[in-house]
Image: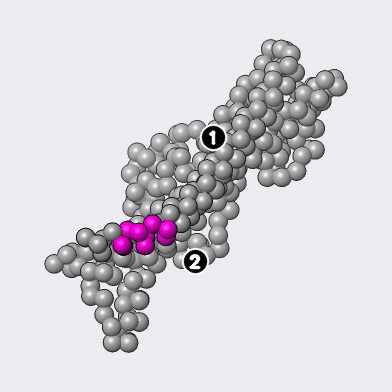
């Protein structure tokens, strides 16, 4: 009874995904009028790339997963930081889940050719577990990569603040200091900053406004705080060189603290194998004595 229910629900979900892809739901007239009357959203500063195989194989799964509200606001920010497209992420989740669901049955078929059988329950439970792991593994990978990218961006931001501070000390204006500092550096973080400043020139907006948007898109609060400090210099004429130097020093202090934390965590992880080896050695020494005592009883 349980396998029939599981197979029936899986077949129903598959047919629902195919139907959602083939016949997308027609939006209501009120939604269409709201889109027409609404203000056009600004183009995102950070661009993400889509894998080629998504356009060929992922179109079946992506609409259904989007209807469910995936991937979520937090994951979308992580995807922007990691440089991965939303469709690629959703298609990866679906493909890995389907692969995990079908892999035990393929193994069952191979064993059946050799005259062996695992029954129905084992492939079913293993398939559900592997499907759940495959569905969640892209989220875990993106979160880990986004955390590392945000840390690297904060490290680059401290150097960027030093360059801006030095340029301001040389007598340059705020916008010129931002442009000159961004043009010097290399790497993905400086590329994002240069793209934000270039977008400010094209849209005729202030550079601190685009930097604030960049900080919101990447979920990096330090970049939004930098934009707020620079806006005081651009609009109120405040002297922000000391503030920028203090922020750069705070970022470097935070960087050193993170490095020390990582080093301590690595030291603790190194102590665990030594402890297990020591416990195994004690068990190896005590085993003959324990056996003698048990035999004497």
Image point (55%, 51%), residue name? 84
Q: Residues within 10 Å of mark 2 (few under 14, many from 20)?
A: few
The label on residue 56 is 2
Residue denoted by label 1: 219
In the displayed orientation, state which residue is furthest to the right. 170
Rendered view: 83 above or below 122:
above
* Helix, strand or loop under label 1: loop
Quadrant assignment, res 227:
top right
**Up-down: is 265 above or below 5?**
above
Say if 120 sits above or below 156 in the image. Answer: below
Asked if one can make out residue 203 in the rendered structure from this viewpoint, the answer is: no
Task: Left or right? Give the position of 220 relative to 102.
Answer: right
Is residue 265 in view from this perspective?
yes
Q: Position of residue 277 (x, y in %)?
A: 48, 55
Disc 2 versus disc 1: nearer the observer: 1
Task: Give, as a single range, the part of the protein colored magenta.
Answer: 284-292
Instruction: Identify the image quadrant of the N terminus.
Output: bottom left
Residue 87 vertical position relative to residue 256 in the rendered view, above or below: below
* Disc 2 and disc 1 in contact, CB within 8 angstroms: no
């Amino acid at each position: 009874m349980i396998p029939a229910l599981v197979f029936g629900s899986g077949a129903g979900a598959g047919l629902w995904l195919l139907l959602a892809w083939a016949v997308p739901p027609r939006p209501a007239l009120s939604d269409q009028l709201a889109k027409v009357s609404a203000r056009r959203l600004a183009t995102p500063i950070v661009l993400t790339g889509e894998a080629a195989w998504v356009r060929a194989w992922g179109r079946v799964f992506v609409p259904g997963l989007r209807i469910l509200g995936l991937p979520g606001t937090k994951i979308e920010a992580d995807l922007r930081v990691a440089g991965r497209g939303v469709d690629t992420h959703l298609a990866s989740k679906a493909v890995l889940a389907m692969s995990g669901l079908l892999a035990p049955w393929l193994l069952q078929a191979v064993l059946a050719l050799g005259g062996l059988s695992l029954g129905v329950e084992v492939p079913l439970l293993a398939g559900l577990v592997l499907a759940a792991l495959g569905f969640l593994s892209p989220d875990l990978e993106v979160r880990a990569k986004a955390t590392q990218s945000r840390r690297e961006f904060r490290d680059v931001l401290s150097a960027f603040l030093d360059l801006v501070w030095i340029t301001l000390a040389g007598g340059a204006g705020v916008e010129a200091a931002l442009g000159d500092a961004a043009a010097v550096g290399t790497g993905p973080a400086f590329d994002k900053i240069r793209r934000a400043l270039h977008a400010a020139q094209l849209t005729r907006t202030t550079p601190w406004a685009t930097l604030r948007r960049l900080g919101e898109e990447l979920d990096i609060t330090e970049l939004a705080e930098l934009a707020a400090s620079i806006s005081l210099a651009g609009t109120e004429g405040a002297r922000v060189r000391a503030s920028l130097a203090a922020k750069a020093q705070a970022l470097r202090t935070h960087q050193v603290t993170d490095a020390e934390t990582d080093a301590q965590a690595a030291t603790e992880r190194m102590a665990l194998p030594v402890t297990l080896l020591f416990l195994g050695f004690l068990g190896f020494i005590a085993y003959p004595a324990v056996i003698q005592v048990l035999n004497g009883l």
